[in-house]
Image: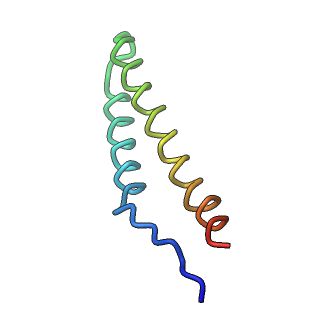
Amino acid sequence: MEEKLKWNAIGLVRKTQMLRDYILKEKNSIPIDHTSKHAKRQGFLDELNHLIEQIEKIEKILIPKLES
């Protein structure tokens, strides 16, 4: 009998998406002429988006390959 890999990310994707949404709202509330604050928030957003993409790749591609 094959065993399935257990993916227990404890809601990591959902929590990361919530954090991303919060930072996006914060970034949008900063006046446009505060470029360094915008850049810093954009950097956080880029990193969070990358993290979410990698977690989804693990769930959708890597785990099924390892299970087969």
Please tell me which residue lies in front, 55 or 48. 55
Using residue 54 as the reference point, say whether residue 34 is left or right of it: left
In the displayed structure, 34 sits above or below 14; it is above
The residue depicted at 67 percent of the width and 65 percent of the height is: 65
Q: Position of residue 43 (x, y in %)?
A: 43, 25
The residue depicted at 34 percent of the width and 35 percent of the height is: 23
Q: Position of residue 49 (x, y in %)?
A: 49, 40
The residue depicted at 45 percent of the width and 67 percent of the height is: 7
In the displayed structure, 30 sits above or below 67; it is above
Q: Quadrant of the N terminus?
A: bottom right
In the displayed structure, 40 sits above or below 8; it is above
Q: Position of residue 66 (x, y in %)?
A: 62, 66
Residue 56, quarter of the rendered image: bottom right
In the displayed structure, 9 sits above or below 27; it is below
Q: Position of residue 18 (x, y in %)?
A: 35, 49
Residue 9, quarter of the rendered image: bottom left
The residue depicted at 36 percent of the width and 12 percent of the height is: 36
Q: Quadrant of the C terminus?
A: bottom right
